[in-house]
Image: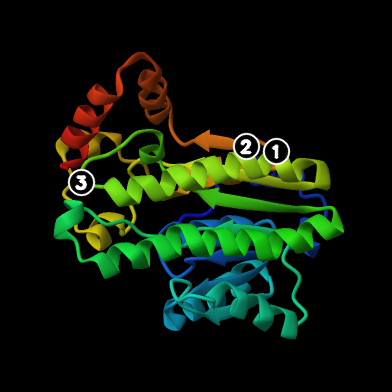
Amino acid sequence: MQHVANAETQTSLVGKLNGAAAKRALITGASSGMGLEYAELLAAQKVNLVLAARRREPMEKLAIELRQKYGVEIVVEPIDLAVPGAAARLKSSLDHKSLQIDILVNNAGYGLHGDFLDTPLERTTDMIQLNITAVTELSFIFGQDMATRGSGQILLIGSILAFQPVPGFSAYAATKSYVLSFGEALHDELSPRGVTVTCLCPGHTETGFDSAASAPVSRMLRLLTMKPRPVAESGLRALSQGKPSVVAGFMNKIIIFSNRLTPRSMQRAVMKSVTGG
């Protein structure tokens, strides 16, 4: 993983998190991809971490590295959040350890590429369970505690696919539309109670997403691909600034703005071409 560039950049990522060293962040999907970046950036701020994902070994390796580098306290929680009731079990485990979560990074999720009827239904429902149900449950369970205390931050991970229907990613794009709508509404509901909710919408990013989704990468998509570090930075920066949502990357912002000027039939055609739908 890359090092955070400088102290000024690090400070801007946390912003409102006064006393960051006394805070603890829960990062789901922390064993790979964007989860590694959120862990590095928050640990650099001396934020203690809880890492949650299915695979213990890569999280333990990451925890050792970040403890040595930043001297933070890190707890590893192996759990499959796609299993019904997993969010409640995770909360119970953290309560048993007397661990308070100040920042929730709802990063766990994955995509499926292909025609809806050609994809096994159990794979689609498993994705919906993780991308929608688990995100909703985690936001509720930890959001309740934050609202009671009058402070807390929740980062949800959407996608630029949330802004229009996407043939070939029909169910996945729909889950991200839910996350974006849910996050922006929750932002307004919880702001008066001292809790900030921000939805980050990345475009194509260099992670393991394509491999996991069995998705092709078009030439256009390669040109639009971002490194994971600046994407994670944009999300944490927007969270610190109290924004309801943010689209990562200048070109992605232009793409989303162009949706306002084109009919939905054209949006679908363009996205199908770009994503290989």
What x and y, as percent, mark residue 179?
Answer: 50, 48
What x and y, as percent, mark residue 208?
Answer: 31, 59
Residue 46's place in the image compared with 170, above or below, is: below
Q: CA distance from mark 3 to mark 1?
A: 32 Å
Q: Amino acid at mark 1?
A: Asp
Q: Which residue is mark 3?
A: 168
> What is the secondary structure assignment of the residue under circle 2?
loop
Whichever of callouts 2 and 1 sits on the residue coming sooner in the sequence is 1
**Disc 2 residue crowd, few under 14, some 14–19, many 20+, Cα 10 Å:** many
Q: Amino acid at mark 2?
A: Pro
Please give the name of the residue rendered at 35% of the width and 25% of the height, measured from the top-left corner. 255
> What is the secondary structure assignment of the residue under circle 1?
helix
Residue 199's place in the image compared with 129, above or below, is: above
Q: CA distance from mark 2 to mark 1?
A: 8 Å
Q: Which residue is mark 2?
A: 244
Are the residues tagged 2 and 1 within 8 Å (C-beta)?
Answer: yes
**Disc 3 residue crowd, few under 14, some 14–19, many 20+, Cα 10 Å:** some
**Disc 1 residue crowd, few under 14, some 14–19, many 20+, Cα 10 Å:** some
Q: In this view of the protein, can residue 6 be seen by the observer? A: no
Q: Amino acid at mark 3?
A: Gly
Task: Please give the label number shown on residue 49.
Answer: none
Q: Indicate the quadrant containing the N terminus: top left, top right, bottom left or bottom right.
A: bottom left
> What is the secondary structure assignment of the residue under circle 3?
loop
Which of these two is toward me, 169 or 125?
125
**Left/right of residue 111 with respect to residue 89 in the rendered view:** left
Q: Which residue is mark 1?
A: 188
Residue 82 found in image quarter? bottom left
What x and y, as percent, mark residue 141?
Answer: 68, 66
Please give the name of the residue rendered at 31% of the width and 51% of the height, measured from the top-left corner. 171
**Left/right of residue 87 with respect to residue 61 in the rendered view:** right
